[in-house]
Amino acid sequence: MKRPIKIIMMVIAVIIELYAAILAGMHGYYEIVNGHKNPGGILFDAISGNSLTTNFNGWPGWPAISIIPDLLITGIVVFIIDGILLVWFLFFNNHKKWIIILVCLAILLCVCGGGFMSPFYGITAGVIVIFMKKIGLKNNL
């Protein structure tokens, strides 16, 4: 009885993590398309590259935070962190500090321009895997 539950939960966790990786990748893509542009603040729209602190008129589209003042470099950093996060989630889930490193990578992704929802979904997928391990479904992905 545990095997079908394990398969279903792992499929759900992997789909959620892949969705998070795609969302972060789209943020990175839009930031790279903007090129060497300073967004004018740490809170900005990834598509237009405009600061949200001065021109916030309703829903901004792809809001993000970045401590890096150049959108091209921000986008490249997002792709790198996103790749590391995806590899960490898929291949190192038996590591002792797996969830702590997953959360740290998600926070780093958030403050480097990966948006807000992708780290949230990444952490949610990690919580599903931790829940599986707590109820006795301890095999790898």
Image (cartoon, rainbow, N blue to C red):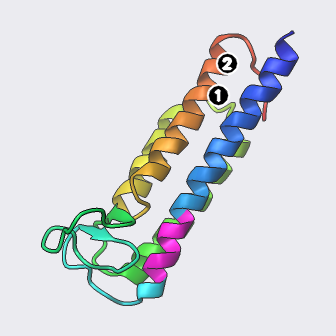
Seen in the image, is 127 located left or right of residue 63? right
- Residue behind mark 2: 133
**CB contact under 8 Å: marks 2 and 1:** yes
Residue in view at x 79 percent, y 22 percent? 6
Label 2: element kind? helix
Q: Is residue 26 magenta?
A: yes
Picture coordinates of residue 134 (x, y %)?
Answer: 63, 13
Kindly identify the residue that appears in the image at 34 percent across and 58 percent down.
111
Bounds of the magenta span? 25-32
What is the three-letter code of the residue carrying label 2?
Answer: Lys
Residue situated in front as seen by the camera: 54 or 3: 54
Tell me which amino acid carries mark 1: Val
The image shows residue 103 at horizontal and vertical percentages of 46, 40
| Label ID, residue 64 | none
Residue 129 lies within the magenta run: no
* In the image, residue 69 above or below residue 82: below
Q: Position of residue 87 (x, y in %)?
A: 67, 52
Name the residue at 43% across, 44% down.
104
Residue tagged 1: 129
How many labels, in total?
Answer: 2
Most extreme residue toward the bottom, as rendered?
36
Most distant residue in the front direction: 58
Viewer-proximal residue among 138 and 4 = 4
* Label 1: element kind: helix
